[in-house]
Image: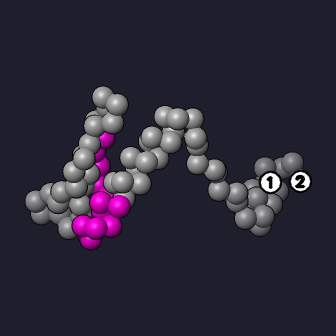
Amino acid sequence: MSVMKRKGSPFYCYEFVFRGRRFRGSTKLTNLVAARRFESNFVEKLARQRGGIVDPVEVPFFYLFAAAFLEDGRG
């Protein structure tokens, strides 16, 4: 696992291999410690998904749900 800064970019990028698959991308962070934490959390999320543990889906606010429901024409 590695976090690095590309030439000419203020943001840190990550690159690592997890179970034979290469992952790389931007952390969109300018702090090295925060970028390493981002990468660590990303790897942890991949490991949890591999074990069948999925993150809970955020529940929308009721007013957003109601607006979408009424626009759909069912209400």
* Mark pair 2, 1: CA separation: 6 Å
Residue 13 as seen in the image, left or right of residue 50: left
Identify the mark nearer the N-term, 2 or 1.
1
Badge 2, how many Cα within 10 Å: few under 14, some, many 20+? few
Residue 25 as seen in the image, left or right of residue 4: right
The residue indicated by pointer 2 is: 75
The residue stretch that appears in magenta: 23-37
Residue 39 falls inside the magenta stretch: no
Q: Please, is residue 72 above or below residue 51 in the view?
A: below
In this rendering, does residue 29 appear at all? no
Spot occupied by residue 40 in the image (x, y as percentages of width and height): 36, 54
The residue at the point 41 percent across, 54 percent down is 41
Q: How many marks?
A: 2
Spot occupied by residue 66 in the image (x, y as percentages of width and height): 80, 60
Numbered label attached to residue 69: 1
Q: Residue furthest bottom?
A: 31
The residue at the point 63 percent across, 50 percent down is 56
Front-most of 73 and 50? 50
Q: Please, is residue 1 above or below residue 50 in the view?
A: below
Spot occupied by residue 6 in the image (x, y as percentages of width and height): 15, 57
In this rendering, does residue 38 appear at all? yes
Q: Residue furthest right?
A: 75
Disc 2, disc 1: CB below 8 Å?
yes
Numbered label attached to residue 36: none
Look at the numbered disc 1 and give the secondary structure of its residue.
helix
